[in-house]
Structures are given as structure tokens and as C-alpha cells.
Amino acid sequence: MDSIIDDKVKLWLTGNYDQSAKDEINRLLLENPTEIRDAFYQNLAFGTGGLRGIMGVGTNRMNKYTVGLATQGFANYLKAQFPDEKIKVVVAYDSRHNSRFFAEITANIFSANHIQCYLFPELRPTPELSFAVRHLKCHAGVMITASHNPKEYNGYKAYWQDGGQLVPPHDHGVINAVNSITSISDVLWDQKSNFVKMIGKEVDEAYLEQLCALSLNPEYITKRRRFKIVYTPLHGTGITLIPEALKRYGFHDVITVDEQAEPDGDFPTVKSPNPEEKEALKFAIKKAKEVKADIVLATDPDADRVAMAIKKPVGNYHLLNGNQAATLLINYLLKEMQSQKRLSEEHYIVKTIVTTDLLSNIALDYNIACYDVLTGFKYIAEIIREKEKTGIFVGGGEESFGYLIGDFVRDKDAVSACCILAELAVHALVEKRSAYLELKNIYKKYGYYKEELLSVTKKGQDGVEQINQMMLNYRNNPPKFINESQVVMIKDYLKQTSYHCKAETMSPISLPISDVLQLFTANNSKITMRPSGTEP
């Protein structure tokens, strides 16, 4: 391994790389050899969703060269798939450091390959990029973002012509195309300006028009004009569209958290720009108490995830977890669609295997289907595409604060989710309830569900090995009891088998292969173990 690392370092020091990159390598060789090892021990993998990693020099880092190799591979694959068409792609970026730089490199390389590239010149949310792919009838799209990762990360999300992230067979096809490029000299770096077109307001307007059409009860919003919303974009792209979207829905008392309103890749007021973490909402909750807000909304840097805090009867605020927000959202959509006689057996919802089964119970009550998919919104998008002619998608979600309403976007959409979450909260108040009491009533009707997320962080090369060993240990030595409740079934998505412990029998799992292990106990508990594909 050391000799492989040495060879890669020498190539960067002697090859056609920027002098600044060479200077940084020499500095790290003197000051931090461990960092050099982590930066070069492997190539940053173009996974099934694209790239994500720490920014810096090296083959295992997000930089000009890894982004260039990925884009050239993506371009090669597109040209092979659409040999007789004028290929079009759209590129957007978030507020992270180097996001605009990476977006411009991406656009330059696509243009150099005679691929028409539409480029947003200012930051935009991820869901708008997904929308733009379909709206502009593009073959693909790229969003430069690392979502809610810490500030040292950036990423490259690759989208196909349906507006969803890559799924089989195109995910592996693009991976192979990227891996087949062995040198930066294979990359066409120089922009052909006639193949790059700037876009912006016209796409914003088309997106907002579709988003406003999702509203089920606009008249309720006009009945509660003093409804107060505190919103924080956590220094991200949400500030570009979410206040305007809420305004168009009829919410005119939206208070933005000043300390977190400015896009800033340092994310100076938070440890991590992740709305899943209570600490990230500290400023927003404080502001909500000051102004006596009805709800709090917070989005991550690329505005595809949203957290919601609702007022309790005593005046404090309850931060919903992802399952609770998804439950309120889906229940509201189905309940109102049924009351308006807009719900039929063709409608369906989608959730991931780690998301609460309460959604399945609600769907069953409304006599519609609920589909389970692997973690990752690209699988929800895949179901939507497969059922475009036979079903009608209502909404979907995952426990990690990602939701989608309607099918004009094919990825998590915090912009539309903010609007519908606010609408359901207003609706509950007008009906002499509250979102908090609505959630309690759902639990009373369908049964109480409690969940908790435990994250274990293991960084670098050693961390990857430790995570792999942890999963191997659980597979080889699964517990027979958890909290004194017997384990009755084990689902292993890597082996694609369900093991029924009492009968000692196996049955197949139909979902794709994934490194996920689930344990089910006699007291109806479900424990899921899953290494993240985007974080350490």
C-alpha cells in the first residue's frame, strides 16, 4: 500500500498538476504524513450517486482533478448512450467552498465535449436542479454539493434524464466510464463558450408555479394571516427560494434568522449544517420564543432536507424527528385528498426501509399502496418512473428529514416540504387543533412509534476498516436478544435474505444488494445497521 501511495504522490509532483497542488503536497509530506496517506490511499470513488469527500489535494479528495475525471467519464457515457442526439445537461451548485469553482469546471468539460450545458450562475437548491433536468428536457444534470456534511466536504451529485439520481444500469455504466480514465490528460478542460448557456429566473418561475399548485387548502392560510414562521437556511441555498415560496403560498410573516441567513461555506454558527441536529436549530428556537412563532423551519446547505419544530401547548417547541414530520406530511396529504374526493386506488406513497412503518399503516387505512425502497431518494425516484403510466405518486420520505410531494421533482425537496408543512400547521390551527395535537391523534389512531438514531463516526482509511469490521461482526455474531426481547428475524440486504430465527428458514429479499442489516424482535422493535455512503 505504501508503494502505491508513493507512486501516486510522485505522479502528482511530476505531472501536469497545478503548482499550488504540488506545494500543498510538499507541505503535508513534511507536516502531516498521515494526511498524505488518507489523501492518496485510494481514488475518490464515483459511487452510485456521484462523488463526495473532503476537499484538498490527492486522489481521495474533492478537487479540480477528481471533478474533472468524473465529468469526462460522465460525458463519455452520455455520448455513448445518445450517439445521434444533441446532448444537454444542467449544472447547479450550493454555498460550500469551491462549489462555484467545481460547477464551472464541470460546465467547461461538458462544453469541451460538445455537450450543451445550462449553468445556474448563482447558487440554487438541489430540488430545483432536479426540476430543471426535466423542465429543460436535458439528458443529465450535476449538482455540486455535499448536502449536510461538515464544511470541509464537497460533492458531485449526478442525475439522469428523469431528474433522479443515477440508478441501474446507468449508475454502474457511469462508474465504469469514469474508472476507465487513467490520466488527467484524457480530460477536455477548455470551455467552448457557445456550448454554455446561463439560466436562472425563468427556471425559478416555472419551478415555483408547479410548487404552488401543490397547495390543498390555500383558503386556510388566508384565514390565519398572523401565522408566524421562523426560518433558517443554515447559511445555505434555501435563502434563494424558500422565503419567496412561502410568500407565494400566502405566508407573509416569515422571520429569517439573521445570524444564519447569509450563504457561507464556513457555516460559522453551527458545528455541522445538519438540521437533524438540535444544536443547529439553537438560533432559530431562540428567535421563535422571542417572536412567539407558530413553527420553526430549517434547511440544510443545498435545501433538500428540512427540520420542523412545532409549538407545544405549554409554549415550548418540540423538534420533530424525520419520521414524525413525514407522518404529519403524509397523513395531511391523504386526509385532505380523500376529503376533497381526489384520492383513488391508483395513488401511492414511497418510503425507505429505515423510515417508520407508521406510514405503511396510514396508507393501508386510506386503501393505497406504500412501497419500501432502500435508503436513498434515487430509489423513490425510480419507483415514480416505473409507475408513471400505472399509478399516481402522492408523496414520500425518509427518516433523515428528506421529503417529496408530487412528481415534478425527483429528489428530496425542502422547498415544497416547507410550504406543505406550514400549510398543515395552519390547517390544524384553523380546525382548533395544532400540529402537536395532530401528531398525538395519529399515534392514538395507528399506534405509538418511537425511534432513535445513533451515529458512530470513524474517519479516514482506518475508519473504513473499522466500519467494515463492525458490520462483519454483526453479520457473523448477531445478538439473540436485544433488551431482553428475542430476535425473531434478521434481514441481510447484502446477502438478500431474511432469516426466520424460530423456524430456522430463509426467504429471499427482492430489493437490490446493499450493506444493510436489520434485526426484528418479539416486542416489535426494528434495529437497522447501515454504513453511510456519504459520511464517515
Image (cartoon, rainbow, N blue to C red):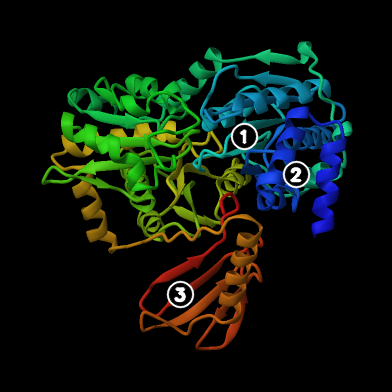
**For the residues marked 2 and 1, what is the alpha-carbon distance in whole angstroms?**
29 Å
Q: Nearer the viewer, mark 2 or mark 1?
A: 2
| Secondary structure found at label 3 | strand
Q: Identify residue for label 3.
A: 520
- Tell me the residue at 58%/55% (across/down): 459
The answer to whether one can see residue 326 in this image is yes
- Tell me the residue at 77%/36% (across/down): 74
The quadrant where residue 93 appears: top right
**For the residues marked 3 and 1, what is the alpha-carbon distance in whole angstroms?**
35 Å
Q: Identify residue for label 1.
A: 163
Of the image marks 3 and 1, the number of the one nearer the N terminus: 1
Q: Residue furthest bottom?
A: 503
Q: Amino acid at mark 3?
A: Phe
**Towards the viewer: 396 or 93:** 93
Q: Amino acid at mark 1?
A: Gly
- Tell me the residue at 89%/32% (across/down): 185
Q: Identify residue for label 2.
A: 59
Relative vertical location of residue 288 with respect to residue 53 in this rendering, above or below: above
The quadrant where residue 429 appears: top left
| Secondary structure found at label 2 | loop
The answer to whether one can see residue 137 in this image is no
Q: In the picture provided, is 286 more to the left or to the right than 276?
A: left
